[in-house]
Image: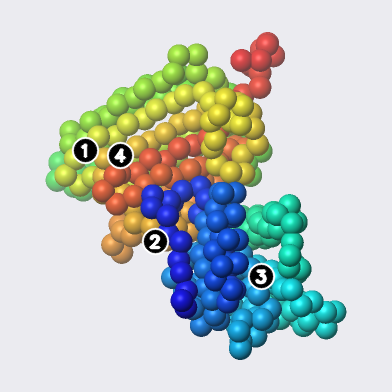
Amino acid sequence: MTGQEDNRPGEEGHGTSGRALLIVDDDTDFAASLAGLLQLEDYRVFQAHDGETALGLIDRQSVSVALVDVRLGTGDGIEVVRALRKKDPDLVCVMITAYASVETAVEALQAGAYDYLMKPFHCEDLLATLNRCFERIQLLKDKALAAARLSQKQRMEAMGQLTSGIAHDFNNILAVQLSNLRLLEERVRHQPELAELVADALAATRSGSDLTTRLLGFGAAPSENIGLVRLDEELPALIRMLERTLGDTLVIRLRMEDGLSPVELLPGRLETSLLNLALNARDAMPTGGTLDFEARNVRLGIDGHHGPTDLVPGDYVVISVADSGEGMSPAVRARALDPLFTTKPPGEGCGLGLPMVENFVRGSGGRLAIDSGPGRGTRISLYLPRAVQCPSGGANM
């Protein structure tokens, strides 16, 4: 028997998939017994009885920990550990053996083994060792995630400075154009054909000015001019504006929870962000569809509701924008918040829409979450901290 995979039905995507481990031991009875024990502890277990099978298996399966016997028949378990770690540097390897020595332990650690277990070992010792392994894996994941978020934050700050500088200069140019076009508009008001051309130019210039305002906001300091926003007043007005703006092909619906808490935000940025999301949703539904806005209070980490992983427990207001469009592929979803990434044709998108929304949400102390997949549309949720007090300084909401 050269190898065996324990693929228990119905467990793909199950919560145990993150507790997957590989047993590499030429003693088939011992490997089977150990696998049975670990399955009772809710581990997902794979078996291999030689190095070649073990190396082939980790190409096909996602495994976090490998328990490797030092002696594999005529093979060398330490060399197997070295090969496994070369193929997957994140794999945590634990040596198991009945023939231990200081030299063997040192050599195993030098090969990349994380820990060492002597046969026969107690079940409690094995489980404690595995707990340490998976705690280490989680710590490394958290560290990598923190580094990725810091890198993204730095990119966003650099992008904000760049776009603000460009937008400021461009806004000065537009101001001159706008002033001259208004003057020209007065001169040609009795010439309909010319007046129409000037009106079109004015509309385009105002659109450009709106864009530069958004770009300037992208680099704005988040602590400036924070104001209290009552969503039960702001959202209905926004929906009425969207119904006039987005056309008849979309059905726009709004659902708000009673007693919706106020939030503290930069004035005007919420409307701009939701408009941005609505326009993206419209582009994802070229033949029409439904666009659902929802606002509700949530208490993260207290009533069982779990939001983005880096949000602290507490009271939030969640504003969701969901479309019935084609949805995002996993590759697009992974890059959706990258500045300048866009799936639109050249000239139809700059790739700053979603990053600008996320920048606004993070600047307000919240987080943005995306739920999307091919054929099931896209839902973008803005988790915004509930305002602590009313403007009058009254009791907490």
Q: Which mark is residue 331?
A: 2
- The reply to whether discs 4 and 1 touch (Cβ–Cβ < 8 Å) is yes
- The reply to whether discs 3 and 2 touch (Cβ–Cβ < 8 Å) is no
Q: Position of residue 352 (x, y in %)?
A: 44, 54
Q: Position of residue 265 (x, y in %)?
A: 57, 32
Q: Position of residue 274 (x, y in %)?
A: 41, 36
Q: Earlier in the sequence, mark 3 or mark 4?
A: 3
Q: Is residue 29 left or right of residue 79?
A: left
CA–CA distance between discs 1 and 2?
Answer: 24 Å
Which one is closest to the eye, mark 1 or mark 2? 2
Name the residue type under label 1: Gly
Q: Which mark is residue 289?
A: 1
Name the residue type under label 3: Cys
CA–CA distance between discs 3 and 4?
Answer: 45 Å
Q: Residue 186 lies in what quarter of the image?
A: top left
Residue to which mark 4 is pinned? 323
Per the image, label 1 sits on a secondary structure element best described as strand
Residue to which mark 3 is pinned? 93
Q: Residue furthest right?
A: 102
Q: Position of residue 261 (x, y in %)?
A: 54, 19
Q: Earlier in the sequence, mark 1 or mark 3?
A: 3
Q: Residue 227 lies in what quarter of the image?
A: top right
Which one is closest to the eye, mark 3 or mark 2? 3
Q: Earlier in the sequence, mark 2 or mark 4?
A: 4
